Amino acid sequence: MQYQADITQGLDATAGGAILLETHAVLNRGPFALKALYANWNLKGSGPASVGANKQNGWYVEPAYKFSEQWGVFARYNRWDNQAGDVIDSRFSQSNLGVNYWPHPDVVVKFDVQNQKSPAGQDAFNGFNVGLGYQF
């Protein structure tokens, strides 16, 4: 849980305070991994309420399997709604399917394809992502 008395730190008098609730879990069993997260914002100001952004929520679930020290696959499904405080459908969902390559134990190269579903009148972003991760 996180509470902020002024979400914009004085930049917008209509923004007000905000409460973030979040929970997540990570399970690793041998080559199998499962991650999940849920988060919920509750913004108190009149500004966010005027556009339905006073309620925001989302979640994801991500199973993964590591075939070897260098190769693995993952899938992710997530949903989010940054304007859940209004009556208009504003919920997005997205599926990703990808592969991980570890050229070194502390470095990962990630590639995935994504399929996004968006509410009517909103653009969906379908395509692919390439990422590089480093842990230290």
Image: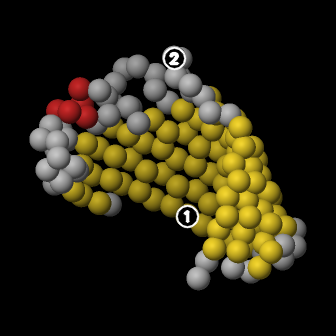
| Residue 35 vertical placement versus 52 (above, below) | below
Q: Is residue 41 left or right of residue 58?
A: left
What's the coloring here?
A: secondary structure
How crowded is the residue under tag 2: few (<14 C-alpha within 10 Å), some, or many (20+)?
Answer: few
Residue beneath disc 2: 121
Residue 117 spot, x, y in % from top left: 62, 29
| Residue 63 vertical placement versus 84 (above, below) | below
Q: Of the residues under marks 1 and 2, which one precedes in the sequence? A: 1
In depth, the one of 6 and 22 nearer the eye is 6
| Picture quadrant where residue 99 is located | bottom right
How crowded is the residue under tag 1: few (<14 C-alpha within 10 Å), some, or many (20+)?
Answer: few
Task: Tell me which residue sits at (78%, 72%) in the image.
Answer: 102
Mark 2 secondary-structure assignment:
loop
What is the three-letter code of the residue carrying label 2?
A: Gly
Q: Is residue 74 visible from the viewing direction of this image?
A: no
Task: Tell me which residue sits at (84%, 76%) in the image.
Answer: 69
In depth, the one of 28 and 132 nearer the eye is 132
Residue beneath disc 1: 25
| Picture quadrant where residue 131 is located | bottom right
Task: Tell me which residue sits at (66%, 54%) in the image.
Answer: 62
Q: CA distance from mark 1 to mark 2?
A: 34 Å
Q: Is residue 7 left or right of residue 119?
A: left
In depth, the one of 34 and 4 nearer the eye is 4
Residue furthest to the right in view is: 68
Q: Are marks 1 and 2 in contact (CB under 8 Å)?
A: no
What is the three-letter code of the residue carrying label 1?
A: Ala
In depth, the one of 99 and 86 nearer the eye is 99
